[in-house]
Image (spheres, coloured by chain):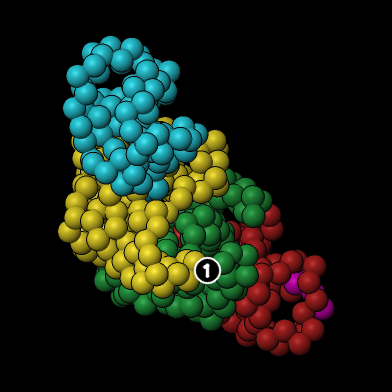
Chain colours: A cyan, B red, C green, D yellow
Amino acid sequence: MDVLYFAWVRERIGQPKERIESNPATVMDLVNQLRAREPRYEAAFADLGALRVAVDQELSDFDAPLKNAREVAFFPPMTGG
Amino acid sequence: MDVLYFAWVRERIGQPKERIESNPATVMDLVNQLRAREPRYEAAFADLGALRVAVDQELSDFDAPLKNAREVAFFPPMTGG
Amino acid sequence: MDIRVQEAPFDLGAETNAFAGRQTGMGAVVTFTGIVRDLDDTRMTAMQIEHYPGMTEKALSKIAEEASSRWNLGDILIIHRFGRLHPDEMIMMVATAARHRADAFQAAEFLMDFLKSRAPFWKKELTGKGDGWVAARDEDEDALTRW
Amino acid sequence: MDIRVQEAPFDLGAETNAFAGRQTGMGAVVTFTGIVRDLDDTRMTAMQIEHYPGMTEKALSKIAEEASSRWNLGDILIIHRFGRLHPDEMIMMVATAARHRADAFQAAEFLMDFLKSRAPFWKKELTGKGDGWVAARDEDEDALTRW
């Protein structure tokens, strides 16, 4: 599964994309695995209220299942237009 | 005082503009003077609900006074845009 | 504020670029363009637009000033044609510029609602079978009550 | 429906003319243009726009399809840029065509409201004193509730 980061999430984690070989059951499980890795992940995921998540390029929720997901992306609220 | 007609009011009366030498006190007095003239005026002013009036190029009412008015215009509801 | 009442065609794209280009610090530009169309399928060959020279300019200025006082705007452009127009020709345009999009949108809608029912223009549809004045629509008059 | 996500500038006037020109039987065309501006007077020198390739196009298509299903529209155009832009450059535009003006206006406002908060773009302001990500505004999120 590919995990993508955008905007300040990308900056805090220090990379735009990485490959995860584990199989987390939900987005929240993935977040917890990442948080346990290094302080930069903990900093990026400190306030989930300030984050949005997309699963396979569709906006999703932190309790969404990740079965068969190929791509998960984390980013701050969008500011298009 | 100049009296102007637009759209189908102009067509019914048969002219775009004429000069009135009388001094009607209100728009309604002017309408009644015109109605008394000829059938084409009566036809044009048959239904005042279908007409609008401007006094000196400002939308006005049929009971508006005409003291010092230089220009009165009659026309159907506007269809700009 | 730029208000033009003219018989000649205008170039929507060139006017829009020029309008947007002369704004400073405005984040939002909205344009509306009205196009001659045969909505009732009456095979309209042309539209004759009559107006009230003198009052037209005053009425448009008044409507634009009212919009400027209600919303935080950078600028307003109104172009309205008269004379004989053919299907698919552009009748008129408005453009508004504002710092925020809500002001630009609302002012443009306000301008259009008042232009429809308070600016002295009248439209006549010319068809092969006869000509007819376009009647004012109740919903256009009703649209004014929201402002 | 024409949706473009691009780094290159676009010509607002040319796009507007082309869009209006390819409509048939549409009486109303509305455009919205977003322009880089320094609202907070932070002396912004540039704006860096990041997006999520792949998801961006999907999100814009979904928003445009939703607008098409809600209003009686002839066509929709969306152009949104990414990369480094400077003050007074155009960031994006939408255009809508409809038989009646209310549909064209409402669809354009709907597109903008959803583009603001549901299309994966992020803006960073670059200034002499440091850079900062533009925060989403509560009022932009609130604007979605009206639809």
Q: Which residue is mark 1?
A: C73
Callout 1: 10 Å neighbours few (<14), some, many (20+)?
many
Q: Residue at x 37, y 61 (%)?
A: D131
Name the residue type under label 1.
Answer: Leu
Helix, strand or loop at label 1? It is: strand
**Rendering coords of residue D128 (x, y %):** 36, 72
Q: Residue at x 23, y 40 (%)?
A: A16
Question: Taking the image as drawn, is residue B6 in sight?
Answer: no
Q: How many marks?
A: 1
Q: From the viewer's side, name the closer residue of B16 and C122.
A: C122
Quarter of the image where one finds residue C83: bottom left
**Relative to residue C29, is residue D59 drawn left or right?**
left
Q: From the viewer's side, name the closer residue of B57 and A27.
A: A27
Q: From the viewer's side, name the closer residue of C146 and D137.
A: D137
Q: Identify whether D44 is placed above or below D142.
A: below
Q: Residue at x 47, y 47 (%)?
A: D136
**Rendering coords of residue C46 (x, y %):** 31, 58
The answer to if D89 sits in the magenta stretch is no
**Relative to residue C19, is residue B35 drawn left or right?**
right
Q: Identify whether A48 is placed above or below D87.
A: above
